Image (cartoon, rainbow, N blue to C red):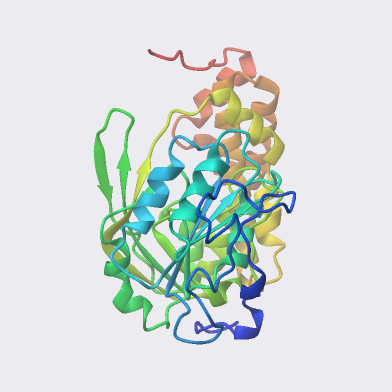
Amino acid sequence: MNSPGLADPGVLPNLSSMVLTDFSGRPNRFCRRPDLRGSFNMKTAGIEGVGNSQIPLFSIVIPCYNYSHVVGRAIESVLSQNTESLQLVVVDDGSSDDSWQVVSDYACRYPEKLVAHRQENQGPGAARNTGIRLGIGQYLCFLDADDELTEGALAALEPQARKGDAGFLVGGHISREEDGRESFHPAPKLLVSREAAFAAYLEREIGFSNGATFFHRSVFDGLRFPEDLLQMEDIPVFALVLALYTGRTFEHPLVRIHKHRNSLRHNAGRAARTGLRVVEVLFNHPLLPESFLKYRKSFTARRALSLFRTFYLSGDRSRALYYFAVAFRARPAILFKGKNLARYLAALTGLRRGPRPSHS
């Protein structure tokens, strides 16, 4: 396992070849400033060398797919942070709306801090991996395009981040509902051992939020986000980081997460395509210690039960029953936990619950 520390400069991106382009390889045409001419390299952006003091402390990566209406808010929340040791990387994952135009405009206005990249649509895991490739900071954070860093977030982290001896730094977050109500959620309490933290995370006894977690760049020497998962792509990464690294927590809220009512049918469609793949990705990963494999059945049961609930609520009786059977085989006692038995019987008899009606 690599201990936290600055990555070997030899593995950093080739700064002289970084340009603002779309996925076709053509230079971006949105820039109107004559000194940029639609493209720029990192020397223009103010980072002139590799392995010197100009390497930023933080790289904030914003993956974006069709979020033109809110990505500007996320970008502004990063650019307004009161620290100079900052790089912002925005990856447009082949958006079909005006996201790339919004991102490109910011890149032209703030070339000293922002690197913009557009690629064909490949999914959230691939977009984050592109951010890892382009990010050169000592700590990387993945901020969702519809969320925002809180005021003073990076200043609160900076003293500990400069030590560079923690595999990850995690803070609290603020949840904002659609009606404007907000609630504060403290940082998870890290347990004494890495194995205990790993098990607690898989049992959902502790949780982590994108935007509130900063990973030391050495974490990604041998780790990437799985690109074949349409959802839950961050779970294997968080779990492996807990298994392999020691972190620190901060009570300061680092991110404001904007909650949205998602379409149940949309979630069910993604769940059907993802299935139990997240279990395979995590427990077949070469970095996972062999002693942690004993948690596979437990996590399989939890994931299968989650799929059962998703398909039960969407009215898909056959899939709901299938995943309940998987959960029961992995952990029989799960049948008698909470409302599981009642839901199972309802699905079994066909008295399944359909999607909840929306209220306008």
**Quarter holding the N terminus?**
bottom right
Q: Position of residue 212 (x, y in %)?
A: 39, 58
In the image, 317 versus 27, the foreground residue is 27
Q: Which residue is at the far right?
A: 24
Residue visible at 31% across and 61% down in the picture? 81
Which of the 4 image quarters holds residue 244?
bottom right
| Residue at 52%, 28% in the rendered image | 341
Quadrant of residue 37 in the image? bottom right
Q: Quadrant of the C terminus?
A: top left
Q: Say if 192 sits above or below 339 in the image.
A: below
User: Percent x, y for residue 173?
Assistant: 32, 52
Q: What is the total number of numbered labels drawn onto the structure image?
A: 0
**235 relative to 216, above or below:** above
Picture coordinates of residue 258, whole percent (x, y): 37, 39
Q: Quadrant of residue 250?
A: bottom left
Give the side of residue 326 with respect to residue 216, left or right.
right
Residue 311 showing in the rendered view: no
The percent position of residue 279, horizontal first and vertical second, equals: 66, 52
Residue 210 located left or right of residue 20: left
